[in-house]
Image (spheres, rainbow, N blue to C red):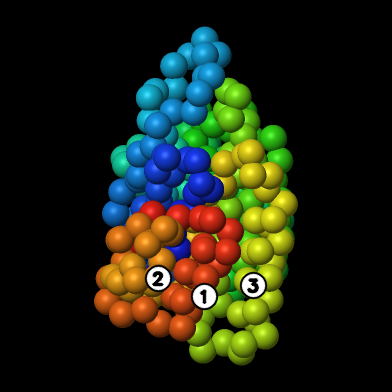
Amino acid sequence: MQGCATLPRPGCSGKYARVARPSPGSGAPPKGGVNYPRFHGMGRGKDKGSRMQFGTWNIGSLTGRLVEVVEVMRRRRINILCLQETKWVGNKAREIAPWGYKLWYSGKTRGRNGVGILIDREYIDDVVDVSRKSDRIMSIKLVIGDEVVTIVSAYAPQVGLDASTRQEFWEDLEEVVQRVPRSEKLIIGGDLNGHVGSSRDGFESIHGGFGYGEQNEAGNAILDFALAYDLGIMNT
C-alpha cells in the first residue's frame, strides 16, 4: 500500500478512515478528506459541524508549499492533515496566518524525512499534547468533548533501505501505539511504503478492502502490525 492506512481501535464502529495519497514523493495533493462522525459531547457554544475530515499526504517537500497545503485543506474541508517527507528540520510549531491553522512538525536532517500534523482553527484548542518520536513518527493528542483521540503521522523507510532502519521504525511505532490507552481513539495516517494488496485472505478482520494489486513484504508487515494491535486498515 503506497499510503498508510488509518488504523482505528476496535469499538470505533468504522468511524475513522483515512484518505488515499499519491505515490511517494509525487507531491500531488490527497484525493479528498474522509468524513467521520462527530465525537460525542461537543457543545461548547459553537457547532463545529456533524463531520470531521482527516487526510494524509506525502508532500515530497513542504518548503515553499505551506500556503498551497492550507488551501488544499480549505478547499477539501480537511480539518486534520498528516504530512510526510516535509524535509524540515526541528521540533517546532508554526501558526499559519491569516487562516489560523497550526502545524506541528519533527525533522532532523535538512532535505530528508520529516513528518508533521496540520490542524485547522476549529481543533487547535483541543490539542493537549504533542509527542515527537523521530523524524519519521510524531503524534498529537486531542480532547474533543468527552473523547480522547491520538493522531499519529508516520513515514516508513523505503524497502531499499537496510533492514535495521526498517526494524527501528516499526519498533518506534509500536512503542507509540502501546502508550495509547485502549479507552482512547487512535488514528495513524501516513506513508508506510508497502502494498497490502487487494486480497483480504487471512486478514479479513483488519483489511478494509481498499487495497489494489499484489501484496509485498512491506505490505505484509503493515498487515501483521495492524493485526497485532487490533487496528483496521480503512483506506489506501
Q: Secondary structure at mark 1?
A: helix
> In the rendered image, which quarter is residue 51 located in?
top left
Kindly identify which residue carries mark 3. 169
Mark 3 vs mark 2: which is more N-terminal?
Answer: 3
Residue 96 in view of the camera: no
The alpha-carbon separation of the residues under discs 3 and 2 comes to: 24 Å
Image height check: is 166 above or below 83?
below
Q: What mark, if any, has residue 202 been given in the picture?
A: 2
- Quadrant the C terminus occupies: bottom left
As drawn, 42 above or below 214:
above
How crowded is the residue under tag 1: few (<14 C-alpha within 10 Å), some, or many (20+)?
some
Contact? badges 3 and 2 (CB < 8 Å): no
**Disc 2 crowd, CA 10 A, few/some/many (<14, 14-19, 20+):** few
Q: Residue 80: tell me if it is visible.
A: yes
The residue that label 1 is drawn on is 221
Of labels 2 and 1, the one closer to you: 2
| 107 relative position to 191: left or right | right
Marks 1 and 3, the one that precedes in the sequence: 3
Q: Residue at x 69, y 35 (%)?
A: 128
